[in-house]
Amino acid sequence: LEVLRKVKETRPEIEVIILTGHGHDDDRELCMKLGAFAYLQKPLDINELSEIIKKANEKIRQKKASQR
């Protein structure tokens, strides 16, 4: 959580994906409130992770394109 806070304070344009093996609903809600792009719990399907990464990358590209 502390890393997420620091990243969003200093580089809010970075999309953060949280991957945890010991997640709780309260943690998920807090992470999303703090600006995480996704909150995933292990074990997870590698295809799901790949899709989330692609979506985060596309969001970044769209933001950059709209700023031009």
Image (cartoon, rainbow, N blue to C red):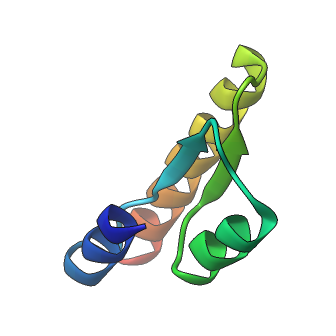
- Judged left or right of residue 33, residue 44 is right
**Residue 68 shows in the view:** no
Q: Quadrant of residue 42?
A: top right
Q: Nearer the viewer, residue 12 or 64?
A: 12
How many labels, in total?
A: 0
Give residue 40's quadrant in the image: top right
Residue 56 in view, yes or no: yes
- The quadrant of the picture occupied by the C terminus is bottom left
Where's residue 14, x and y in %? 36, 62
| In the depicted structure, whether residue 54 falls above or below residue 58 | above
**Which of the 4 image quarters holds residue 51?**
top right
Q: Residue at x 63, y 35 (%)?
A: 21
Relative side of 52 to 53, left or right: right
Please, is residue 60 above or below residue 47 in the view?
Answer: below
Figure check: 49 above or below 33: above
Residue that extends furthest to the left in the rendered view of this protein: 10
Q: Return the x and y of residue 41 as percentages of the image width and height.
A: 71, 39
Q: Residue at x 33, y 69 (%)?
A: 2
* Residue 26 image position (x, y, % from top left): 73, 73
Front one among 56 and 62: 56
Q: Residue at x 62, y 83 (%)?
A: 33
- Which of 35 and 58 lies nearest the eye of the viewer? 35
